Amino acid sequence: MPGIDRQRARIAPQLATLQQAFEAKRIQLQQTAPLENPELVLVLEVVGSVADFARAVRLVPGLEWLFELAEDQIAQDEDFYSEEENKRAELLSGRLYLLGSNQEALAQLIGLWNRYQQDPAGKFDRGLAPFKRVFAHLRTIRPWDVNDRVGTDVRIYWQDQVGSGQDVSRFEIEAWHFTAATKNTSARAEIEALVRQLGGRVLSSALISDIAYHGLLVELPTEAIERVLAGEVPALLLSDRIMFFRPKGQSMTDGLMEQETSAIEDDRPASERPPVIALFDGLPLSNHALLADRLIIDDPDGWEAGYEAKDRMHGTAMASLILHGELDGGHASLERKLYVRPIMRPDPNDGFHQRRREQTPNDVLLIDLIHRAVKRIFEGDAGQPPTAPTVRVINLSLGDSHRIFGREMSPWARLLDWLSHRYSVLFIVSAGNDPSPLKLETPRGSLADMTPMARETLAFAALIRANADRRLMAPAESINALTVGALHADDSPNIAIPNRFDLFAQRGLSPLSRVGHGYRRAIKPDVLMPGGRVLHMEQFIGVPQETVVELAMLSAKPGHRTATPALPEAGGMSETTYCRGTSNAAALTSRAAAQTYDMLEALRAQLQNGPGLEYDAVLLKALLVHGASWGDLSTRLLDSRPDLHAITDTNRRRIAQKDFVTRWLGHGPLDVERAITCTEQRATLLGFGELAAEEALLFSAPLPPGLAGTRAWRRVTITLAWMSPVNPKHHAYRRAKLWISEPGAELRVKRTNSVDDKAARRGTVQHEILEGEDAVAYVDGDRFVCKVNCAADAGILEGKVRFALCVSLEVAVDSGIRVYQEISERIAPPVGIRPA
């Protein structure tokens, strides 16, 4: 870090510039609001981090803590650098502290700086010491400006809007969220006035304080946006009330469904059992033969009247997958109703296709629509009772293509995290699709003569090279949600089509599926499920040294066969079609959640002190992940990265390889049967409870005596899941950190083909797979012990956090050890639970 003399030379001019900015703001306000106190948002870029800085900020009148962002992309310079020569090329980590300030608060901040620069070792008043560390680590202090508010994403969006030829364009403004309600009200009024100056209007707004969100949907004449792109800077762009200009939050269908249809008969009886799964999607065709009497459609906005039957593609397909699975698989239907809330409708401007594209509406804020829809389920609205209080899972097979995850949580993800904890509900979210062409490093025209394995090797390599462009689509980064990626797999018949290639014939990772990591490098996607196979076709353009392939959307198969509406000229209510993508994978995961819930209900009926309904969501989350593992997919992925094998340091090589595999596979493909069924050689125990910060619980269960002293292969799988409250203004975000301490010591097992132990603790699921085969000495009556711990992670953690724990012990089938029977005979009284 720079010494005090260098900091004086660097920081003093920046503070002077801030004073000039405040003075300019004061002069501007004198003309319109002379009694208004000028305010700016300050950006403090700090190398490293400063503990308790938020508390110190609150002690300075006029300063308000607005936001904290982790910054891992700080380049080394002559002032901040690593003293180790071999690390000079690495990027530094730090923080961006965003503070609201008035002129008086800035004066106090400068006073603190003056005291520090005169005597860096001097004492500050009680609670203000963190400012000393900030001044020592401070790289930049400046006002939040136009370049911060207007990012590349919204400029590209505005260019597209201008090119569309429409008279008006809609986008979102994310205003700063202040603690005082009066400041939020005045911010909205100021933004509305500035929008009117440009001939526009605010269509809707939403203020959700629990996620620090203040959003406005704005409509401006496209001509005004064109002037901005040409370099004009209107007062709206200069408003200190605005955090970000955003593309309009939107989700739309992506064309991964076929038009070819075939009819199907369905004689499976419907059920009157209440819904456990809610589907937020397009409006399904409720009288389709596969869906009739199986849906509870809640359409409070009255969209059905303008939603032609032929356009109800996506919601119909997702409802079909949840209720029946893929139709070529011959699966049993769910014996429950499905609650459906339409949040997409046909695009009124789409006159180019037989079936209009479905999208979220362009006249409301998507965040507000989701918020109201969830609240209606659990609390009701307009004086009405809750519409579906039995729902435990909400399926979101859609995402916002304008919000690709980088390092900042999207408002949509923040909303899902907050709602998950508030209502004890599990959101199952698709990771998002990327249908981009692949560039294969082989001469054009050579694919047809290759073996399937050779083509797959080339395709995998092409996917890996493009991984930076395949990041998650909002809200898939949500830490409390279960994010689902897609496998290149389905039950449809194999077909051969000329000039169409199945580039991933081993049915591994789908080339459509977006990949992780999540926030603070948490494991995302959580699990993988079949998303349907896709075929590719060669483009005969480009340089002859490479082959470009694109998705071939011309054949009905392969893919998932689902219900679909017929075109008007065809008629009928029993048509099916094929579709594919991460939407399908999420829907199939929701189906698995419903099957898992039925198992929990049957188990609860047998127990006197079983888990209350408030634990359903975390139990479902834990059980779904519990059946996941990498299998041989990790080996196939690593074979495409020989550079990772070449790392000489053993520990670095292990971490790099696991990090790479986790980014693509998460915890791996989901196997719901392993999670919810036991065998003679596999027993699964469930635990649940709640913890406050700095508390722990010990769970113990009897060890099977047949394994004692025996050299036999064994596997212990442990899954811990919880719904964390969040602190959206803190860089750590997740308020509750739970973890399992050193599992597996009693059985001499260790981590094998699974995620790195540090990565496993970054989200709200810890999933450990441990194996061993050495003989273990213990006696009948000894127990397996598992300790669940809780700590605050992003400021103060108030109250207790519910969690669920799944522990499986299995041995080889040919071992002859009856693990299930031996544990179940010794488990009365039930699994021991006591405070640690």
Image (cartoon, rainbow, N blue to C red):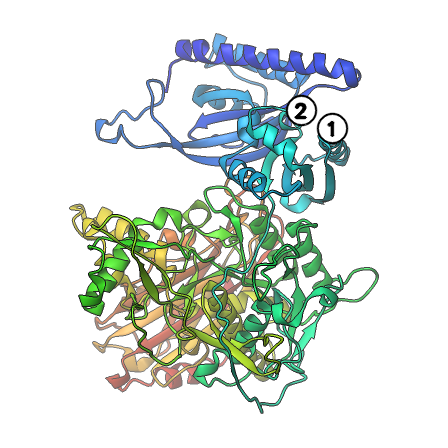
Q: Is residue 291 above or below residue 626?
A: below
Residue nearest the viewer, comparing 754 with 744: 754
**Quarter location, residue 600:** bottom right
Q: Is residue 132 visible?
A: no
Residue found 23% across the figure and 52% down from its top: 546
What residue lies at 65% left-to-right and 19% top-to-bottom? 105
Are the residues tagged 1 and 2 within 8 Å (C-beta)? Answer: yes
Q: Is residue 196 above or below residue 627?
A: above
Amino acid marked by disc 1: Gln
Q: Which residue is mark 1?
A: 197
Quarter of the figure with the N terminus: top left
Q: Picture coordinates of residue 572 (x, y %)?
A: 61, 83
State left or right for residue 426 relative to residue 645. right
Q: From this viewpoint, is residue 136 visible?
A: yes
- How many C-alpha atoms fall within 10 Å of the one at disc 2: few (<14), some, or many (≥20)? few
In the rendering, at what x and y percent does residue 185 appear?
A: 77, 35
Above or below for 825 versus 286: below
Does residue 505 appear to the left or right of 352 in the view shown? left
149 up-or-down from 544: above or below: above
Quadrant position of residue 709: bottom left
SS type, badge 1: helix
Please state which of the two labelled residues, at mark 1 or mark 2, is closer to the viewer.
1
Q: CA distance from mark 1 to mark 2?
A: 9 Å
Determine whether the residue tagged by mark 2 lies in a helix, strand or loop: helix
- Residue 235 circle label: 2
Q: Residue at x 71, y 15 (%)?
A: 28
Please state which of residues 109 and 366 is positioned toward the viewer in this rendering. 366
Q: Position of residue 352 (x, y in %)?
A: 57, 59
Viewer-proximal residue among 255 and 674? 255
The amino acid sitting under disc 2 is Ala
Q: Which mark is residue 385?
A: none
N-terminal of the pair, mark 1 or mark 2, is 1
